[in-house]
């Protein structure tokens, strides 16, 4: 085999796996977890999200490494993580409509787990307190302007929420998903003044006897910065699996992609192009092309991607490297989180062999609650 189809992701029996198919590699996942803990300075500081993988097995791998706090995007993810053994779970998505009652049902179903809700609207938080007693973390807008209370309104609103019946204020959820600076030094400069404001608000609360003990800071790109600047909890997540997008954008984050897409060449429409069975139903489409990176053919560029087809072009000097029809290749998704949600289950490969299949359990919006 050549370097294109003999690589880190190849395995015995791949010829029998129907493509396209996402494949997970536990040994790489374990190493990524180890690196994440090392950056954080210990497992106790981590509050990682699970939306990237949505799998009980990956949650359990992190629990085995000493992590017992997790962040979820859906009630289904929270239910899955609670069943997997998590001890503290934050539902990091505003609770509205039926999800308020579902959150109450979640707490009743798992009394041994400490659950936290987040929010940015007083009326919705009041409704939550009227439905059940709830630990709440105020969702703070750190500058992304997606959800969250603006920084200049945080303190007054936090004090108001602290008086609402049924609501137990515990701290703040401080996600800065807009921190996309490739340079870690630029991320540090941008993050420092906001972290300082948050810490000052926390200190004033504490001085007045108001509980604000928990701050959950950052995402994968920014958590190393928060780790150095604060002593607070850190919330990476994508880095546990990692993808081509984060690997290429943040060279300081030395995580290895632990998921790859098995795909096959299905056509050779022209002298410098070939077509794979990796259409937009098989890989996340939120990144603009390139949506995946072919291992060993990183120079290939998208011509067009349809539902079941991905046509790529290679430079003139690589035309001879175009593989024959039927060739098995591996591609690293640019964005792994929504890619994982496209597959009901994934084969797991250890020591070059498939050792089982893991269900992507929380891709479903509802499990039992």
Image (cartoon, grey):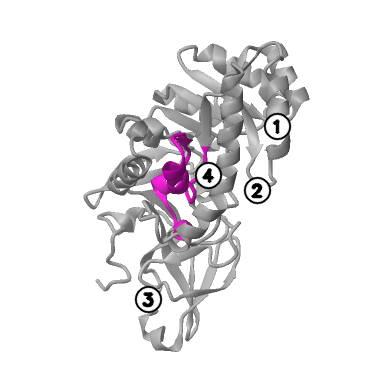
- The residue lying at 42 percent from left, 24 percent from top is 86
Quarter holding residue 138: top right
Quarter holding residue 5: bottom left
- The residue lying at 43 percent from left, 21 percent from top is 87
- The residue lying at 52 percent from left, 27 percent from top is 214
Q: Earlier in the sequence, mark 4 or mark 2?
A: 2
Q: Which residue is mark 4?
A: 341
Q: Earlier in the sequence, mark 3 or mark 1?
A: 1
What is the x, y in percent for residue 143? 65, 47
Q: Which residues are magenta?
A: 217-246
| Kind of element beneath mark 1 | loop
Q: CA distance from mark 3 to mark 4?
A: 29 Å
- Quick check: 349 left or right of 221? left
Where is 324 relative to 36, above or below?
Answer: below
Q: CA distance from mark 2 to mark 3?
A: 43 Å
Q: Nearer the viewer, residue 200 or 356?
A: 200
User: Magenta includes 261?
Assistant: no
What is the x, y in percent for residue 23? 38, 50
Q: Which residue is mark 1?
A: 120
- Quick check: 218 left or right of 26? right
Q: Nearer the viewer, residue 61 or 204?
A: 204
User: Magenta includes 229?
Assistant: yes
Q: Which mark is residue 323?
A: 3
Q: CA distance from mark 1 to mark 2?
A: 14 Å
């Amino acid at each position: 085999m050549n370097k294109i189809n003999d690589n880190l992701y190849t395995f015995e029996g791949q010829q029998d796996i129907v493509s396209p198919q996402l494949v997970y590699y536990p040994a790489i996942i374990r190493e990524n977890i180890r690196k994440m803990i090392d950056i954080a300075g210990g497992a106790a500081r981590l509050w990682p999200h699970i939306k990237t993988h949505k799998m009980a097995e990956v949650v359990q791998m992190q629990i085995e490494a000493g992590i017992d706090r997790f962040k979820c995007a859906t009630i289904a993810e929270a239910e899955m993580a609670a069943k997997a053994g998590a001890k503290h779970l934050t539902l990091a998505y505003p609770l509205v409509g039926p999800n308020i009652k579902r959150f109450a049902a979640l707490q009743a179903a798992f009394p041994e787990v400490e659950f936290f809700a987040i929010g940015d609207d007083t009326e919705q938080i009041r409704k939550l307190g009227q439905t059940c007693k709830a630990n709440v973390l105020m969702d703070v807008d750190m500058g992304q302007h997606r959800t969250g209370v603006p920084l200049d309104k945080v303190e007054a609103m936090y004090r108001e929420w602290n008086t609402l019946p049924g609501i137990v204020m515990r701290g703040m959820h401080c996600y800065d998903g807009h921190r996309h600076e490739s340079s870690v030094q630029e991320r540090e400069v941008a993050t420092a003044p906001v972290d300082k404001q948050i810490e000052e608000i926390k200190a004033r609360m504490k001085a007045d006897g108001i509980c604000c003990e928990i701050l959950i800071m950052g995402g994968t790109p920014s958590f190393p910065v928060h780790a150095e600047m604060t002593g607070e909890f850190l919330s990476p997540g994508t880095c546990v699996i990692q993808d081509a997008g984060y690997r290429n954008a943040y060279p300081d984050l030395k995580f290895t992609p632990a998921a790859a897409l098995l795909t096959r060449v299905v056509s050779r429409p022209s002298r410098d192009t070939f077509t794979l069975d990796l259409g937009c139903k098989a890989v996340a489409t939120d990144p603009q092309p390139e949506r995946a990176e072919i291992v060993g053919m990183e120079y290939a560029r998208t011509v067009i991607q349809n539902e079941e087809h991905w046509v790529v072009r290679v430079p003139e000097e690589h035309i001879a490297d175009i593989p024959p029809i039927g060739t098995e290749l591996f591609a690293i998704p640019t964005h792994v989180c929504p890619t994982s949600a496209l597959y009901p289950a994934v084969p797991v490969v250890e020591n070059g062999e498939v050792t089982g299949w893991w269900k992507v359990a929380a891709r479903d919006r509802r499990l039992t609650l």
